[in-house]
Image: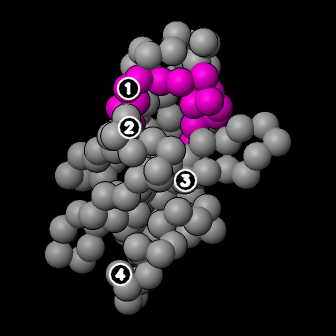
Amino acid sequence: QVNLVESGGGWVQAGESLRLSCAASGDTDSTSTMAWTRQVPGKQREVLAAIYTNTEGGRTYYYADSVKGRFTISQNDAKTTLWLQMNDLKPEDTGLYFCATRRAAPREGGFVATLWSSTAWYNFWGQGTQVTVSG
């Protein structure tokens, strides 16, 4: 079991920045992929960015086109804290931001590049933190 708690959301004006944090506790050593996702009312939850850590400790980063170049995902070595630095925020970035993580599975490495953007890839979710960007 992994518990995730997000923080750092708030209200900002367009063009400003925010940094979200996600504190992970429990069996974090068993996880492989951590991600930030966004939920907007009336739309499907979108995976914005993810970090995959392989069995050798190497990391691969993934970004959705909607945030590439503006958002940066990062994680500490212990996989107990995940961050999302969000720059040049736009009104369409408004939403509820969730942290998510996946329990590592055998031979999953070949599928990460294809499946990281699917919400079904992840096993554990936080409660979310609201981000509101006014134009």
Percent x, y of residue 21: 40, 33
SS class, disc 4? helix
Residue type highlighted by circle 4: Gly
| Magenta stretch: includes residue 85 | yes
| Cα–Cα gap, marks 4 and 1 | 30 Å
| Cα–Cα gap, marks 3 and 4 | 18 Å
Report whether residue 4 is seen: no
23 over 104 or under it: above or below: above
Identity of the residue drawn at 52% across and 10% down: 13
Report whether residue 5 is seen: yes
Q: Name the residue carrying label 2.
A: 71
SS class, disc 3? strand
Residue type highlighted by circle 3: Val
Which contiguous range is marked in magenta? 84-98
Residue type highlighted by circle 2: Phe
| Magenta stretch: includes residue 123 | no
Q: Name the residue carrying label 3.
A: 47
Percent x, y of residue 72: 33, 40
Q: Name the residue carrying label 4.
A: 109
**Circle 1/circle 2 CB separation < 8 Å:** yes
| Cα–Cα gap, marks 2 and 4 | 24 Å
Mark 3 or 1: the one toward you: 1
